[in-house]
Image: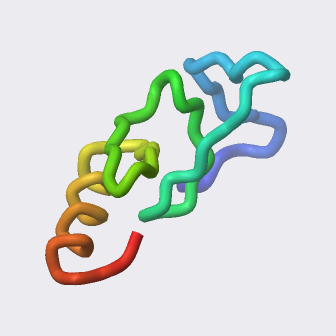
Amino acid sequence: PIRKPGKAPVFKEKHPEPDTEMARDPECGVYIDPRKALVFETGGVTYYFCCEQCLKKFQAKLKQGGTA
């Protein structure tokens, strides 16, 4: 979408606290606040996801013999 000059996008969500460590979604690569992320644990490793779609894609790859 095109926006008019001088108009900044409005973000409704607050930025995490400066000392909050961000987690990276292994499926899409976006950085997210782990307190708000979907969590999946396997093989002693915890993964964080931005949305249900990324989590399901990741799980499907694991079922097909992919590596995490």
Location of residue 50 by image quarter = top left
What residue appears at the point 57 percent right and 39 percent down from the top-left corner?
32
Q: Who is closer to the viewer here, 68 or 48?
A: 68
Where is residue 65? Give x, y as percent: 22, 82
Q: Residue at x 32, y 44 (%)?
A: 40
* Residue 12 vertical placement versus 43 (above, below): above
Number of numbered labels in the structure image: 0
Q: Position of residue 36 (x, y in %)?
A: 46, 25
Q: Residue at x 42, y 64 (%)?
A: 27
The one nearer the camera, 62 or 50, is 62
Placement of the C terminus among the 4 image quadrants: bottom left
Q: Residue furthest front?
A: 44
Is residue 23 positioned above or below 20 on the image? below
In the picture, measured across the screen, residue 46 lies left or right of residue 18, that is left
Across and down, in percent, residue 29 comes to: 55, 61
Q: Quadrant of residue 18?
A: top right
18 versus 53 height, above or below? above
Q: Is residue 60 above or below residue 47?
A: below
Splitting the image into 4 quarters, where does residue 6 fall?
top right
Residue at 65% x, 47% y is 3
